[in-house]
Image (cartoon, helix red, strand yellow):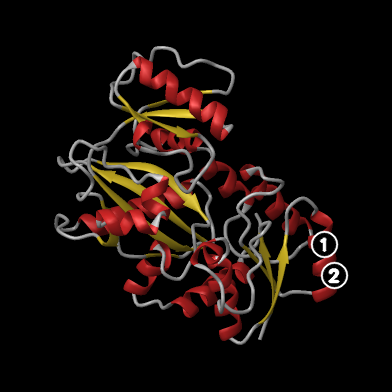
Amino acid sequence: MKRVLALVGEGALPPSSLEGKTPEQIDEWKMEYDVIRAVKVLGHEVTGLEVSHDLTRIRDAIEEHKPHVVFNMLEDFQGIVTFDAHVVAYLELLRVPYTGCNPRGLVLSRDKSITKKICTYHRIKVPRFVVFRRGRKARSVRKLRFPLIVKALLEDASLGISQASVVKDQEQLEKRVAFIHDQIEDDAIVEEFIEGRELYLGILGNHRLQTFPLWEINLDSLPEGAPKIATARIKWDEKFQKKHGIETGLAKDLPDGFEARVQRLAKRIYRMLGLSGYARLDFRLREDGSLFLLEANANPDLTEDEDFASSAEAAGLKYEPLIQKIINLGLQWRPD
């Protein structure tokens, strides 16, 4: 049995039971509930700690509970997504083992432009792109070809992505970049839009890596003419998913040897970005067989019925053993 300190974001500390809770309430802390429940089922002693603005709460909890490992489920700190790396660095300074990705991997994978630059250096295909920093208007992008897709540079979980994110001319581009700057409060990354299938690949490990089967979000049921992209609504709105028949599952009808090739490529990318613990890589596959990395997601969603855990189960790794492996990897990780 291990003592586990579970770090969760503000408002995400779950109750001990789902009884009497509405689906809307459960959505706020479903991942945290699933993980903490699994840790308890595994026989460990777990203490939950809600963290928002004060690092001393983490230090005090560590001194009081003396955890063998910290299960890190923070997605930001002080409301800033890039600060999650600083919290992990603080855990390293305290010499406390933790689950998930190390600070360097979090920084490199969080910034989509850095990820793409590293991949380009290693001759791994990514969409051509340009970044417009906040306060700068979107100028003409002559080196890129429309249609383009406009995303927040640092945010994940498809925040800020909608059908309007795919733009076909300069006027639409300027409006969408301004939306990212003003509403999402982030820099904007503008990429050439890659038509094709959207594939996800989960990876687990520090040095020896385990890949899960390729997973796919099926967007064929979207209205005709709508861009086939995984918007925030498609990813998180269950009513919308049911209405339009949006499903995710094992990728089918792939060319012979393709999945093994992607798994080898994913391991290269994982190591190039200095990732550890667990991650999910997002790809686009064109009809001509060209494969492009879209982004790397360190510490992806661990909700029991979401893509990462579902793909692990498809590989024969059920939820509780998956959580145990993540704990073991945290205990084994040593900063360079």
306 sits left or right of 100 in the view: left
Q: Secondary structure at mark 2?
A: helix
The one of 50 and 113 positioned closer to us in this rendering = 50
* Quadrant holding the C terminus: bottom right
Q: Dot 2 corresponds to which residue?
A: 63
59 sits left or right of 195 in the view: right
Q: Is residue 286 above or below residue 96?
A: above
The answer to which image quadrant residue 309 occupies is: bottom left
The one of 59 and 272 positioned closer to us in this rendering = 59
Say whether residue 215 is visible. no
Residue 253: give x, y in percent of width and height: 14, 58
220 sits left or right of 198 in the view: left
Which class describes the residues within 10 Å of circle 1: few (<14), some (14-19), or many (20+)?
Answer: some
Which class describes the residues within 10 Å of circle 2: few (<14), some (14-19), or many (20+)?
Answer: few
The one of 251 and 258 positioned closer to us in this rendering = 251
Q: Is residue 173 above or below residue 279?
A: above
157 sits left or right of 244 in the view: right
Q: Look at 34% across and 13% down and name the residue there.
A: 142
Q: Look at 66% across and 59% down and name the residue there.
A: 11
Residue 198: give x, y in percent of width and height: 29, 48
Q: Look at 37% across and 16% down and name the residue there.
A: 171
Identify the amino acid type marked 1.
Arg
Report if the CB atoms under discs 1 and 2 are less than 8 Å apart.
yes
Identify the amino acid type marked 2.
Glu
Gap between marks 1 and 2 measured at Cα: 6 Å
* Quadrant holding the N terminus: bottom right
The answer to which image quadrant residue 174 occupies is: top left
Q: Look at 32% across and 37% down and name the residue there.
A: 125
